[in-house]
């Protein structure tokens, strides 16, 4: 029994140690009408993890620290991250309870697509770009 427990602990530690951190550093071409999407973004994800850390100028402005993202999809074609910003106020003073973000990185092309949607509104902001992996 002790040997089995030791083996399981060793296997768990070894598999965690083998997990690889991937940093996505992305630049996007953001039209003026789509300014709720950042022109640059960094995402740190440990392969196999269900969460990631995401940071961009919009997150820094509203949260003052990186946000936690969830992995919504991870397959041979793409990996998709989702996160939200609570209580966002625009320059006109309008406030939305949450802004929902979704970033999809396409593994074969290195391209990225990001959408931003204010919860409760029909608006949708989108931009596209490329990422370098580190």
Image: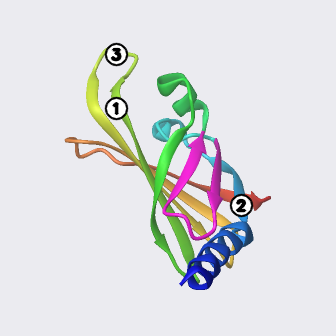
As measured in the structure, the alpha-carbon distance from the residue carrying label 2 to the one carrying label 3 is 40 Å
Q: Is 69 on the left or on the right of 122, as rendered? A: right
Q: Is 115 on the left or on the right of 19, as rendered? A: left
Mark 2: give few (<14), some (14-19) or many (20+) Cα within 10 Å: some
Question: Residue at 54% across / 23% down in the picture?
Answer: 64
Residue sticking out furthest to the left: 120
As measured in the structure, the alpha-carbon distance from the residue carrying label 3 to the one carrying label 1 is 17 Å
Q: Is residue 18 above or below residue 131?
A: below
Label 3: which secondary element: loop
Disc 1 marks which residue?
Answer: 86
Q: Which mark is residue 63?
A: none
Q: Depth check: 20 or 88 in front?
A: 20
Q: Position of residue 44 (x, y in %)?
A: 65, 52
Disc 2 marks which residue?
Answer: 21
Question: Residue at 35% across / 48% down in the picture?
Answer: 124
First along the sequence among labels 2 and 3? 2
Q: Is 39 on the left or on the right of 79, as rendered? A: right
Task: Quarter of the image for the C terminus: give it.
Answer: bottom right
Question: Residue at 62% across / 84% down in the picture?
Answer: 3
Which range of residues does the magenta coloring cover?
A: 40-55
Q: Position of residue 123 (x, y in %)?
A: 30, 44
Disc 3 marks which residue?
Answer: 92
């Amino acid at each position: 029994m002790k040997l089995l427990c030791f083996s399981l602990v060793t296997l768990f530690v070894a598999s965690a140690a083998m997990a690889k951190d991937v940093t996505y550093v992305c630049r996007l071409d953001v039209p003026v009408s789509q300014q709720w999407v950042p022109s640059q973004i960094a995402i740190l994800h440990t392969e196999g993890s269900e969460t990631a850390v995401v940071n961009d100028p919009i997150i820094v402005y509203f949260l003052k620290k990186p946000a936690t993202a969830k992995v919504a999809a991870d397959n041979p074609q793409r990996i998709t991250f989702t996160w939200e910003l609570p209580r966002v106020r625009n320059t006109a003073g309008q406030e939305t309870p949450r802004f929902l973000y979704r970033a999809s990185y396409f593994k074969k092309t290195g391209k990225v697509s990001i959408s931003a949607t204010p919860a409760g509104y029909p608006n949708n902001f989108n931009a596209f770009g490329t990422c370098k992996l580190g």
